[in-house]
Image: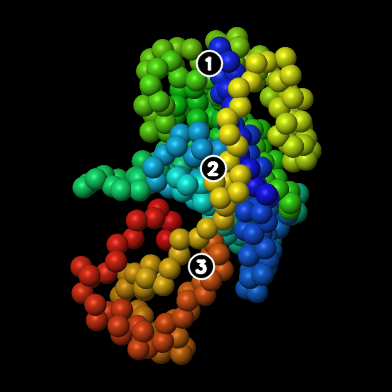
Amino acid sequence: MSELHKFLFEGLPVRGILLRLTDAWKEILQRRAQNAETGAYPQAVRQLLGEMTAGAVLMQANIRFEGALVLQIFGDGPLKLAVVEVQNDLSLRATAKVVGTLDETASLSQMVNQNNQGKCAITLDPLKRHPGQQPYQGVVPLFDDIKQPIDQFQKVIEHYMLQSEQLDTTLILAANDEAAAGLLIQRMPMQGQNNLSAHHVLRDEDAIGKNEDYRRISILASSLTREELLSLDANALLHRLFWQENVRRFEPQVGDTAPRFSCSCSRERVSQMIRGLGQEEAQSILQERDNIEVGCDFCGLQYSFDPIDTDQIFSIPAGLQPPSTDAIQ
């Protein structure tokens, strides 16, 4: 069962979140494995996508953004794109596109950053946009300040969050075929509520790397092994790391409030995509085959449009088409 635990350290400017995705993560893998056209992800992609999924859920749970948080990596290599989308209720979906062959033990650089062209992007798409409002997006390269490739995905997110929130963050991520898990430790802001839109005060930036309490707890968190993160229950894990600290835990999010798989694809949204192709292009497809077939990369659901369905798409005025609000189509 997937679960999320929030906690803080009494009297210290440090907070944390512990996450383990089980049923939600296995459903993502199962749906992909059942896709006759693509088959299962290679092992290296499964591990990376699992770490991305855990990282995206931790970020969304941390900032409590009213809308979708979309985490993407892309660049040069066999892994052309990996995407995770997490809604404000922690419903989530994830997918990856691989072109060509990929070694089962490939590193992050080998998969997507062979020539230091890889990037990580995080998009915040508000649930209810104001007129003229655009999603906020931040992009960082998959290399550090001296242009050395970063081969641990958790370090990419730490770098991103330091730049965006101006707050020290420690992130531990791990994934296998049974679970995707993560631990986030963060120095709390001096004032106000920070988020990935880079709302911060100068005192937050000035305090980077200087808080001794955060540094001590970060060192403790960094001692956590991948195997412990994937196997220990929340009580055992937090006691193992922080038994000397005064930790205040909040009600865990399990069951209906836990992170869970959910796909927002729909026939209406696919209709919009076909309309975007234009009537001439749609008709040319139908000259070659009986139906226009579109599959959802996230959940695997197939949508079919015959010539009558396609004519109906273009017979409805554009202004009457239902709006699309999600960042990922």
Q: As displayed, is residue 220 above or below residue 229?
A: above
Q: Nearer the viewer, residue 175 or 138?
A: 175
> Dot 2: what SS?
helix
- Tell me where residue 217 sits by quadrant: top right
Q: Nearer the viewer, residue 226 or 158?
A: 226
Mark 2 / mark 1, whichever is N-terminal: 1
Q: How many marks?
A: 3
Q: Amino acid at mark 3?
A: Cys
Res 181 label:
none
Residue ID at (61%, 62%): 99
Residue ID at (34%, 60%): 324
247 to the left or right of 324: right
Q: Amino acid at mark 1?
A: Pro
Foreground: disc 2 or disc 1: 1
Alpha-carbon distance for marks 2 and 1? Answer: 23 Å
- Tell me where residue 18 sits by quadrant: top right
**Mark 1 Cα shell of 10 Å, populated few (<14), some (14-19), many (≥20):** some
Give the residue pinned by disc 1: 13
